């Protein structure tokens, strides 16, 4: 089962579909892994997949470098804050916060997503 979840998470992550969600849910809900350890595993899992995906997406000209720089600084600050918070919060609180986050994102996607126009091929 671990190999299947790893494979599905890798495929989803490389397509930008949130493979970390699959891995985090599996580790925290279906194994005896604590939320904090599951988050650490997810980060270590994400790094090589992200590197490979970035290389492929850069090669295919699918990344707007200006947009990347806009969000990198805020993302790094958020990652540092989140890491410190997760070290001090109880695992049960982290699980509940993660569940609420998933529900909010799911509702947003269901009811408030605006359909983007796909660029037309030349």
Image: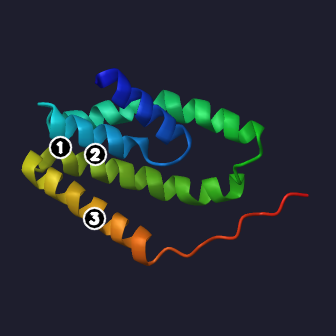
CA gap, disc 2 and disc 1 = 6 Å
Report the side of 32 relative to 64 (left or right). left
Residue at image point 53% right, 47% down = 16
Residue topped by disc 3: 103
Q: What's the CA distance linking mark 1 and mark 3?
A: 23 Å
Q: What is the x, y in percent for residue 10?
A: 46, 32
Q: CA distance from mark 2 to mark 3?
A: 22 Å
Residue tagged 2: 83
16 versus 49 height, above or below: below
Quarter placement of the C terminus: bottom right
In this picture, residue 111 sits left or right of residue 68: left
Q: Is 69 on the left or on the right of 89, as rendered?
A: right
Residue at 62%, 54% (x, y): give it.
Answer: 69
Q: Which mark is residue 87?
A: 1
Q: Who is closer to the viewer here, 76 or 106?
A: 106
Question: At 25% from the left edge and 43% from the top edge, which residue is drawn?
Answer: 25
Say whether marks 1 and 3 touch (CB < 8 Å): no
| The quarter of the displayed image where residue 103 is located | bottom left
When the figure is inspected, residue 71 is found, relative to residue 112, above or below; the finding is above
């Amino acid at each position: 089962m671990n190999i299947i979840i790893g494979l599905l998470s890798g495929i989803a992550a490389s397509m930008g579909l949130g493979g970390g969600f699959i891995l985090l849910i599996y580790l925290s809900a279906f194994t005896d892994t604590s939320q904090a350890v599951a988050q650490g595993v997810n980060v270590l899992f994400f790094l090589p997949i992200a590197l490979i995906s970035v290389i492929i997406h850069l090669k295919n000209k699918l990344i707007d470098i200006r947009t990347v720089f806009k969000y990198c600084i805020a993302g790094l600050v958020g990652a540092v804050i989140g890491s410190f918070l997760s070290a001090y919060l109880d695992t049960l609180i982290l699980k509940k916060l993660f569940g609420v986050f998933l529900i909010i994102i799911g509702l947003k996607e269901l009811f408030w997503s605006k359909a983007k126009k796909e660029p037309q091929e030349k």
